[in-house]
Image (cartoon, rainbow, N blue to C red):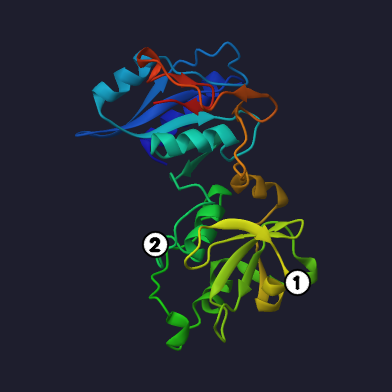
Amino acid sequence: MTQTESAILAHARRCAPAESCGFVISTPEGERYIPCVNISAEPEAYFRIAPEDWLRAEMQGEIVALVHSHPGGLPWLSEADRRLQIKSALPWWLVCRGDIHKFRCVPHLTGRRFEHGVTDCYTLFRDAYHLAGTEMPDFHREDDWWRNGQNLYLDNMAVTGFYRVPLSSAQAGDILLCCFGASVPNHAAIYCGNGELLHHIPEQLSKRERYSEKWQRRTHSVWRHRHWHASAFTGFTTIWPPPQPVCEHGSGSHSRPVDADAGLSPSDERRLVPDTYCR
């Protein structure tokens, strides 16, 4: 554990049962944690960082992560966290249950443009599992690998922690391997439950759609991660189309609407609202 991580955990313990908050900065001397005061009127449910704390952190170094905690809550980002993390373009670190969960700023899971090896079906699979707390390798993959004697999905599912389950036992979060114009499985989709899947196919935006007979015919096999548990599915389903009003969301039991389209006055541009970053 690094000195920065130790400082983050110690700050979260001091603040509990209120949410802690702060920034990780990079300086010529190294990485450092800047704790901030949670000025929320309901600090056990939300966090708010004063503008002067934000400016103070920026003056001391480059901000490389925003940190907050979910005391007694779930170890993944809330809907508001995800929406505003994307706006911030920063990694968000979340303290929960004595651990630090580090979330890359991955794009929204739906509406992505397809680019093989950059934003393709495996990227979506990998990013979704990252949001649910499971890290997957970023495998190098040439386009049309399935036509060149390779079998990348089947060769790597077991070694990355997945095991095969019957299609009849599929549950939300399972991975469907499909043959998409190929004799070997060359496409991965995430089963969402209720007869729906999330996936990204060439020349289309990533989307959620019905697990229709067409996709059932193309399904080669179903896979489940050995550490998967049902609650992890909420880690990457916090934002589904159509867009819903953003909710301030802290440890998991309190929520209230926030106007996601409301403009910010210049004086509010750097205001952090509970679980929400505005810039």
- Looking at the image, can residue 219 be seen? no
The answer to which image quadrant residue 193 occupies is bottom right
In the image as oriented, which residue stretches furthest toward the bottom?
A: 149
Q: Is 132 in front, or is 243?
A: 243
Mark 1 sits on what residue?
167
CB-based contact (under 8 Å), mark 2 and mark 1: no
86 sits left or right of 78 in the view: left
**Which quarter of the figure is the C terminus placed in?**
top left
Mark 2 sits on what residue?
118
163 sits left or right of 131 in the view: right
Q: Position of residue 90 (x, y in %)?
A: 39, 38
Mark 1: few/some/many CA within 10 Å (<14, 14-19, 20+): some
State the SS at label 1: helix
Q: Position of residue 119 (x, y in %)?
A: 43, 60
Amino acid marked by disc 2: Val
Q: Position of residue 170 (x, y in %)?
A: 75, 65
Q: Is 140 in front, or is 84?
A: 84
Residue drawn at point x = 40 percent, y = 64 percent: 115
Residue drawn at point x = 48 percent, y = 33 percent: 84
State the SS at label 2: loop
Amino acid marked by disc 1: Leu
278 sits left or right of 207 in the view: left
Foreground mark, 2 or 1? 2
In the image as oriented, which residue stretches furthest toward the right?
A: 168
